[in-house]
Image (spheres, rainbow, N blue to C red):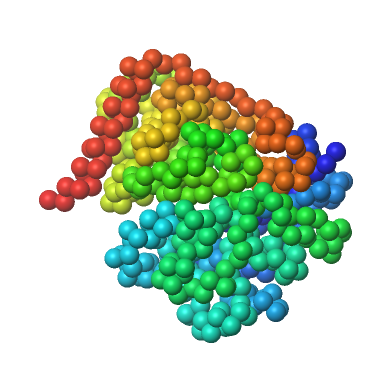
Amino acid sequence: MKHVLAIDEGTTGVTCLMIREDGSVVGRGYREITQYFPQPGWVEHDGAEIFDRTLESAREAIASSGATPDTIGITNQRETVLIWDRPTGTPVSRAIVWQDRRTTPRCNELRSQEERISRVTGLKLDPYFSATKIEYLLREHELVKRARDGSLAAGTIDTWLIWKLTGGTEHVTDPTNASRTMLYDIESGKWSAEMCDLFAVPMDILPEIRASSGDFGIARADMFGTPIPINGVAGDQQAALFGQGCWKAGEGKNTYGTGAFLLVNTGNIRPKDGGGLLTTIACDERGSHVFALESSIFIAGAAVQWLRDGLGIISNASETEALAKSLRSNDGVYFVPALVGLGAPHWEPDARGTIVGLTRGTTRAHFARAALEAMAYGTADVLTTMQDLSGVAFQRLRVDGGASANDWLLQFQSDILGVPVERPDIIETTALGAGGLAGISRGVWSSAEEFLGTRKFTTYSPSGEAPERVASMAGWRRAVRATLAHARDTE
């Protein structure tokens, strides 16, 4: 059988999977990545270490599988950037990680350009994205002249890994990663000369953009014992969207982690801006670019962690399912987990966590149920906004992440949305998506449908009546209004 090596380079570590053409994972490797915090709000990675850990993890996965990969797919932490010397392949400094906030003052200087930046790139002006990071590195390390004379290369981590794996022959990226830099024109599909000029980034320093499923060069024989083509690249959340089979307009996925990452494919038509959502690039079934709406809910599984670590009313997260099942309803108890403010679609940084509806009859079961319900309600709020902006009818939600193991949550999510919720048998969808993009290009699978056919899904179908959904959401929105009122009433 043919095999795909899927490299998932994340923020805290690198996971590599060897995926056989029948869809089974036959090899696995993992290495942690060191986090550097040189100043408050600064987060850095060592680019050389990232590459070394990637090689170690990949070689472990290959060795444990006993097979040789036919192709390589790469997915990566997005927005993190690195600049390196072209002749030597040596980074000029540590990489600036997506979490880093050091360029906040620069973003504040550009507020008058915010609307224009959003129109061109689909993104909100924020230090989260790559443009101000590259600008900062060029300025602080006095590299502008070298950038202009062609002796430097810049890129997100996918670009860095490909450069190293191919021995410096390929300086490339894909549209999903390019769309997170704030230097990419989301409609033309090219680097924006206007944005590069605004952020003082010479365009020649940026990689060539290639389709997410296709030719990204060949990893040299000294990397894995034989030359292996690289045929798939996508940023982590878009790779997960592809790995979940969300290739058509109206299909989306939610990753229930500490927070919740939602992406919905909106097809070939760019959705309207608004609601605090991001417009980004995703992949269709051929790996060609389509538009997607993206948002993150700040607190999801972290609310359950708070019940365990902050209040001590549960000893582990798995208890919440039995506690939620023990109640016939929430008895009017709602928890708005604005523990770090409210994100989309409300965007109120001063909001704080709120619990309403408490009575003498309230128990720890109500707290557990309210925390799970909040994940479903928050998801429904954002998906409603996404549907309104895109004009695309939402068909289903595919899910992954740690909290997706909770059957009660997924059934409740389906009931609230009124559409099926589907959980895959393998929830490492980020790596699987990168592997799928590579394998389809290389012929491991003849089509995206054949790739997805190797997977099994558990489906949760709506069981409640529409009036019940409406009443539940009305109670949630009333609780959110109370939270917002408390945050905004400063008298």
Q: Is residue 94 visible?
A: no
Quadrant placement of the N terminus: top right
Q: Taking 471 as reference, is 288 above or below it?
A: below
Q: Position of residue 345 (x, y in %)?
A: 34, 43
Q: Taking 202 as reference, is 455 above or below it?
A: above
Q: Position of residue 93 (x, y in %)?
A: 58, 75
Q: Nearer the viewer, residue 194 or 320?
A: 194
Asked if residue 39 lies left or right of residue 50, the reply is left
**Residue at the image position 56 percent from the left and 28 percent from the top:** 422
Among the 4 quarters of the image, the one containing residue 368: top left
Q: Is residue 424 visible?
A: yes
**Residue at the image position 35 percent from the left and 60 percent from the top:** 116
Asked if residue 68 lies left or right of residue 396, the reply is right
Q: Position of residue 411 (x, y in %)?
A: 49, 23
Q: Taking 205 as reference, is 335 above or below it?
A: above
**Residue at the image position 76 percent from the left and 46 percent from the top:** 442
Q: Taking 238 as reference, is 132 above or below it?
A: below
Among the 4 quarters of the image, the one containing residue 21: top right
